[in-house]
Image (cartoon, helix red, strand yellow):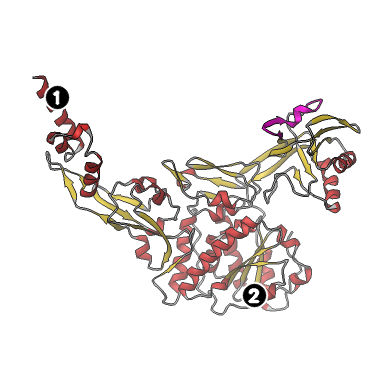
Amino acid sequence: MKITDLPESGPDGRARAAALAGLRLDEAEPAGIVGFISHGRCLVVGEEREALDFARRVTGEIECVVAAGSDGRVEAGIVEGIRTVRGGRLSIAGALGDFEVRLVSGNEQRLLGQMVAPPVERFDLVVDLGRTPVLQQAMKPLGYYSPGADESLREQVLATLPEMRGEFEKPKYFNYNPEICAHGRNGKQGCTRCIEACPAEAIVSAGETVRVNPYLCQGGGVCATACPSGAMTYAFPMARDLLDALRKLLGDYRAAGGAAGALLFYDGASADGLAADLAASMPEHVLPVEVEEIGSVGMDVWLTCLAYGAEAVWLLSCDRTPPQVLEALQDQLLTARTILAGMGFDEHCVGLVNVDQTELASQGVAARAQNPVRTPAAFAAPPADKRGTLRLALQHLQAQASPGRRSVSLPAGAPFGEVRVDAAACTLCMGCVSACPTHALQDGRGLPQLNFREWNCVQCGLCERTCPEDAVRLHPRFVYDVEFRERPRVLHEEQPVCCVACGKPFTTRSMLEKVSRKLEGHWMFQDEAARRRLQMCEDCRVRDMFAAEARKDR
């Protein structure tokens, strides 16, 4: 639903109309197509009388089974001509055309569909009339309807059900690159942002990576904006395609005579709550842009739009916006505002407003920023990767900023920061290096050094959890010195210990002392020759052991 009837009385309004006329976001191609097949087998869940009455009203080729929860014993039969199962507690999983429904009673679980005659292997549709739905996720699966006690919603479901038989398609909204995912390494868990943010509960841990169920995914997009490394990307449209369109939009607005335009992102849910009079009174310098879901527009897009010449960027939410989406966006807003304020810009040039709570003007959308981000517009096309996009946007904004602080502390969970190492505890075992998914931590290439490139660090915590000496700590922050955050630096180094046999450097003093302490009471290292082998490199140690065995055989 596009916001229409925008005022065009002034030069900004006329420029806005000209720019929006050329905006093409509905031509985006999805990453793929997800298909569903529904045969019209419907489960109606609720109090028995209500569920039976509802089932009788379902028309078309939809076959209904009623599941009526009760405290009594579990039993199945025909009630008023409708297959009915009483008792037990329901467990529901799946989506349109493939709902698995189990009945849990005590320690026993049974497939509900196998309890009726003729049996139902899978349900295609579920109508949950309960006041508290069985499924609690903010974005319910396709084919699952939970109107509760709302009669108008129940009528809408009744009108929809006859159309839910056949073949259906939806876009595949995401792409996932496990190679740069920071979820896990070496048996340790790191970043879980996408799992926690998904309002459809479509993402689960798969060990060192994550797995997305494309049938549950409904394009909330917040998984991609919350992902610090760019492993999860939104694909409808891709961020790069979106930014190309927004760059053109802002350029067309300026070319048509508009000044200092601001962007207002909204989705279908938030547009429904935007009253016509509010749309009609929207300030003429505000350019509304409809996206699939506001959660799909994250910090990389906001900052790049500012670099492209937008005075401000606003996200329009509503009471139906899932709380996980709002929380993830608030976290990103806090990070972005902190970084912008450190540059000397008004932190309120990015914001989140709720259209259901009060009119836009009272939330600051109509007001001009006190110290807006007014910079020469960047015209470079955005790179394909998220971190690259952020890098270019931040560098452009920083080049126009007033001199500010060297760095700012960021809230925990921010995707920027440093790693601090306790030099007294670190043995340079390089466990943190092997765990780092972004190569922010690197070894010394033959030297006993731990090196760090701050820009690469996404603060996933894998290094902290991997370190056997508990010597690593995260410190979320943003450093404004571009060279400092891009240049590798040494976090810890030691003089190498050289092999007593061949003279080759092979370990560090702290590591040698640690190993010697651990093996102090071991029966294999009780004589001087065995203890001396600890001071040898791997090759010399093997040769010395074979030489000792040969001497014994003489």
Q: Between 521 and 174, which is closer to the camera in this rendering? A: 521
Q: Number of labelled discs?
A: 2
Q: Position of residue 56 (x, y in %)?
A: 90, 39
Few, some or many residues within 10 Å of mark 1 (<14, 14–19, 20+) = few
Q: Which residue lies most toward the left here?
A: 554
Q: Is residue 126 left or right of residue 392?
A: right
Q: Which residue lies most toward the right here?
A: 80
SS at circle 1: helix
Considering only order in the chain, which callout, 2 or 1, is on the residue closer to the N terminus?
2
Q: Amino acid at mark 1?
A: Glu
Disc number at residue 549? 1
Residue 520 visible in the shown view: yes
Q: Position of residue 117 (x, y in %)?
A: 81, 25
Up the image or down, 108 lies above or below 469; here it is above
Residue 13 visible in the shown view: no
Q: Between 134 and 191, which is closer to the camera in this rendering? A: 134
In which quadrant is the N terminus drawn?
Answer: bottom right
Q: Which residues are magenta?
A: 103-119
Q: Position of residue 442 (x, y in %)?
A: 33, 50
Few, some or many residues within 10 Å of mark 2 (<14, 14–19, 20+) = some
**Toward which corner of the image does residue 458 lie, by quadrant?**
bottom left
Q: Residue at x 60, y 59 (%)?
A: 327
Q: Tell me the residue that label 2 is attached to.
A: 364
Q: Between 48 and 165, which is closer to the camera in this rendering? A: 48
Q: Which residue lies most toward the top here?
A: 554
The verdict on residue 107 being magenta is: yes
